[in-house]
Amino acid sequence: MLRPALLTVIAALLIPPLLCAKAWPCTCCSQELVRSTLDGAEAVFSGTVLGMELNEPRYSRTVTLQVERIWKGMLGKEVRVTTASDGAACGYHFEVGQKYMVYAYRSHGTTLLRTGLCTHTKPLAEAEPDRKLFGVGYTPAEVERFASQIDGSSGLYQEGVQYRCE
């Protein structure tokens, strides 16, 4: 027969997890094709992380990148994107000095760009299939120079046609 003290310890270990609210980790709902991800993104570019800052109340980080190549979007030489502060909330883990291919989206009707684990953002060294599919892209200087020649202001990639600077 179990002693009352032992029953108390067992109950103390088993009951609290049942009373806690459920916590859901980050899960990506689908594995979209890279082309459809490009179509849905506001901006797709490669760049080097210059710095990061933790936003208050510490649920997100702002990452500043020096833009090297642009496949979609009207971007300058530097861009700031936000991401959740940790992977459990689908935040992407950037490292200062590292190069990435970033798929960014508008954040809830604002001008802020956001990215995360489920956006195809990845280290540039792992993005060769993406770059092969999209071509060489553009430099920020090319985007600036040709921006006035593009119909509309939504970006270099419109209605399934990737504009090329010849």
Image (tube, rainbow, N blue to C red):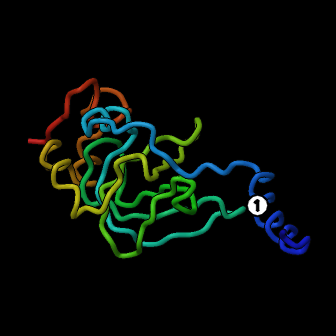
Q: Identity of the amino acid at label 1?
A: Leu
Q: Is residue 131 left or right of residue 50?
A: left
Q: Which residue is mark 1?
A: 14
- Which is more toward the observer, 91 or 8? 8
Q: Position of residue 104 (x, y in %)?
A: 41, 46
Q: Return the residue found at the far right.
A: 4
Among the 4 quarters of the image, the one containing residue 78 = bottom left
Mark count: 1
- Which is more toward the observer, 86 or 156? 86
Among the 4 quarters of the image, the one containing residue 39 = top left
Residue at 53% across, 50% down: 26
Q: Return the residue found at the far front.
A: 1
Residue at 59% across, 38% down: 108
Q: Position of residue 73 (x, y in %)?
A: 34, 42
Q: Return the residue found at the far left.
A: 166
Q: Position of residue 44 (x, y in %)?
A: 32, 46
155 is higher (above) or lower (below) than 6: above
Residue at 34% across, 39% down: 31
Residue at 35% across, 65% down: 66
Among the 4 quarters of the image, the one containing residue 53 = bottom right
Which quarter of the figure is the N terminus placed in? bottom right
160 is higher (above) or lower (below) than 41: above
Q: Position of residue 160 (x, y in %)?
A: 23, 26
Q: Secondary structure at mark 1?
A: helix
Which quarter of the figure is the C terminus placed in? top left
- Which is more toward the observer, 66 or 63? 63
Number of residues whose C-alpha sits closer than 10 Å to that of mark 1, classed few (under 14), some (14–19) or many (20 or more)? few
